[in-house]
Amino acid sequence: GAVVSQHPSWVICKSGTSVKIECRSLDFQATTMFWYRQFPKQSLMLMATSNEGSKATYEQGVEKDKFLINHASLTLSTLTVTSAHPEDSSFYICSAMDSQAGKLFFGSGTQLSVL
Amino acid sequence: DAKTTQPTSMDCAEGRAANLPCNHSTISGNEYVYWYRQIHSQGPQYIIHGLKNNETNEMASLIITEDRKSSTLILPHATLRDTAVYYCIVVSGTSYGKLTFGQGTILTVHP
């Protein structure tokens, strides 16, 4: 079964609204989670590294005020797309690191469509 | 992390072995070779990884050349459900998790 749960699987929102995506590690603690974005027919692009209890580390070109990341517990990281616009429509994917097992697990992704 | 080069696409007949190559000529000594695949509209799925030695698990085999500059992922008996984009990623042990995905190889398994 899935060890990383990502919710919702898909979301449609109006331009200007905010959308929150959740990433949960189900049976392990993840001090580090990662957020990716994938446009159609393109590869995954790392957006940011989410660290439990501290500020996220964003990749170059990713607006931290637009893509808010919160990692308040060892099993949950959230990505909030603020004031979403059509160009933010994309497939967002999270991953979580099980440090004890030395394994990385990916969520099933969230398809965001901004109208 | 070292850059990888993979063919854009490959075809394979169902039931036959699929051999997916990957070049990573600038790999350094502490970097591992990881393979993931992504089926359409899903998150990536871990397949296998290795450092120097060849590896095998229930999904696939990984053959790494002696100089470590290239590797081949082998799906011994491809099925239609193996149709996916396959990513070869090289990453150091200390930064595993922060993966850089290339364009991957689109593998199409046909009847």
Image (spheres, coloured by chain):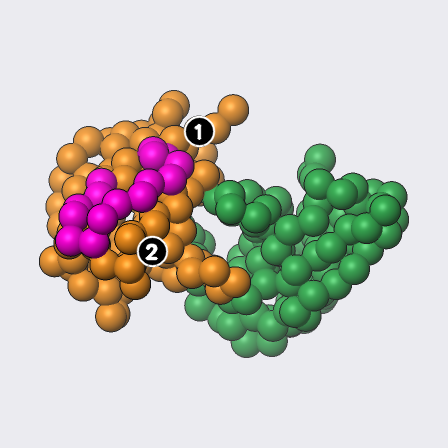
Q: Chain in orange?
A: A
Disc 2 marks a residue whose amino acid type is: Ser
**What residue appears at the point 65 percent right and 69 percent down from the top-left corner?**
B8
Chain ID of residue with mark 2: A
**What residue appears at the point 27 percent right and 40 percent down from the top-left corner?**
A21
Residue underneath mark 1? A3
Residue underneath mark 2? A89
Task: Give A51 or A113, whichever is nearer the viewer.
Answer: A113
**What residue appears at the point 82 percent right and 55 percent down from the top-left corner?**
B12
Disc 1 marks a residue whose amino acid type is: Val
Q: Which residues are magenta?
A: A6-20
Whether pointer 1 and pointer 2 mark residues with C-beta atoms closer than 8 Å, the reply is: no
Query: Is residue A79 visible in this depiction of the protein?
Result: no
Chain ID of residue with mark 1: A
Label 1: state its secondary structure. loop
In the picture provided, is A11 more to the left or to the right than B26? Answer: left
